[in-house]
Image: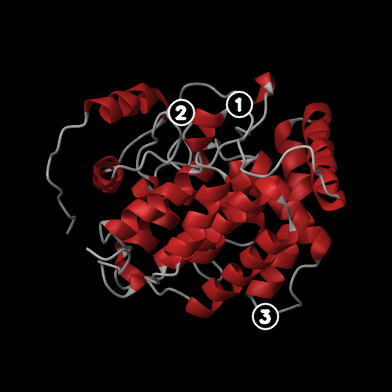
């Protein structure tokens, strides 16, 4: 049973949402969560970037759009993103950060150099091939840790994940699905496919089924140990990287905590927004918590967030 919300008019935000309609497909769940985002007063972006529609629509799949100016990465109008079009909104614009400028640390220089190398590989080898090659080793380490078959990823893998998520949101989305879908539902092959070919109809349908089932089925088993392991890796990633590279790991941790029905989600989401006000994923986590929206398998449909 879906929740309903007062139909309070907000012409400004509705106009912004209408402007995004060519890029997103809103399900019934997404419509509710989109309304929650509008009514919460949170746009998930600054005044120059329109609010995206509901993340938990689950039909919004990750794309290849990045936070940098790369014309070759702008997809057609049928492109949809898991984060509800945050990649589309940010395409062609560099990410903003509250990090002080002119004081680059050696660590920051290293991550930016890694990002530059990743972008070069995408330009030379093609986006899909480069993305698949980039995530293969980090994803393997990620799954070994989740499945208790190996140690946690090392610094090199964590940095590769952080850079990958900052440059291609489909990489982030594959990590999310591997957690909420449970062990065996999103193996290495699927993760790489989701990350490198998110617009392939078969991958889109597969991701949709996994997320829809996990979100709507109250009997779907949520592997909390596995989720906590993923959250720990995202926390370690955020701790290991500077500036803008922290944003998506923090947002993923917040999202998974929200999925589990844990109020700590708010802390991570707000940290992500503190670094980048345009992080739609984090903004929608905050909105969902404020309005008591949660997945059916989180233990209870309404989760505790901000005090009413």
Q: Which residue is mark 2?
A: 49
Q: Tell me which label, 2 or 3, sits earlier in the chain.
A: 2
Mark 2 or 3, closer to the camera? 2
Q: Is residue 163 left or right of residue 221?
A: right
Q: Tell me which label, 3 or 1, sits earlier in the chain.
A: 1
CB-based contact (under 8 Å), mark 2 and mark 1: yes
Q: In the image, residue 180 lies at what x, y percent? A: 47, 64
Query: Looking at the picture, does residue 226 appear above or below residue 240?
Result: below
Name the residue at 38% across, 34% down: 51
Asked which secondary structure carries label 3, the reply is loop
Decide: few, some or many residues near mark 1? Use Cα within 10 Å; few <14, some 14-19, many ≥20: few
State whether residue 181 appears in this view.
no
Name the residue at 51% across, 43% down: 279
Q: Is residue 162 left or right of residue 96?
A: right
Q: Which residue is mark 1?
A: 93
Asked which secondary structure carries label 2, the reply is loop
């Amino acid at each position: 049973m879906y929740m309903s919300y007062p139909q309070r008019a907000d012409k400004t935000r509705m106009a912004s949402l209408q402007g995004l309609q060519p890029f997103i497909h809103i399900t019934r769940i997404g419509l509710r969560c989109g309304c929650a985002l509008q009514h919460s007063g949170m746009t998930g972006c600054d005044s120059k970037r329109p609010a995206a529609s509901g993340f938990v629509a689950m039909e919004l799949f990750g794309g290849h759009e990045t936070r940098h100016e790369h014309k070759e990465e702008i997809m057609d109008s049928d492109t949809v993103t898991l984060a509800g079009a945050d990649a589309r909104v940010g395409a062609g614009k560099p990410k903003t950060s509250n990090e002080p400028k002119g004081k680059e640390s050696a660590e920051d220089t290293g991550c930016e150099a890694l990002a530059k190398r990743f972008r070069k590989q995408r330009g030379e080898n093609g986006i899909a091939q480069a993305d698949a090659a980039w995530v293969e080793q980090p994803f393997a380490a990620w799954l070994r840790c989740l499945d208790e078959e190996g140690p946690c990823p090392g610094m090199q893998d964590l940095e590769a994940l952080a850079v990958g998520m900052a440059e291609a949101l489909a990489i982030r989305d594959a990590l999310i699905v591997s957690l909420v879908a449970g062990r065996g539902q999103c193996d290495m092959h699927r993760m790489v496919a989701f990350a490198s070919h998110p617009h392939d109809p078969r991958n889109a349908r597969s991701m949709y089924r996994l997320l829809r089932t996990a979100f709507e089925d109250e009997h779907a088993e949520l592997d909390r140990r596995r989720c906590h392991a993923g959250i720990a890796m995202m926390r370690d990633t955020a701790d290991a990287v500077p500036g803008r590279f922290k944003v998506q790991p923090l947002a993923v941790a917040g999202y998974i905590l929200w999925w589990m029905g844990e109020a700590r989600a708010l802390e991570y989401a707000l940290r992500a927004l503190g670094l980048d006000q345009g992080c739609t994923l984090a903004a929608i986590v905050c909105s969902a918590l404020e309005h008591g929206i949660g997945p059916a398998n989180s233990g209870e449909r309404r989760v505790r967030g901000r005090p009413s």
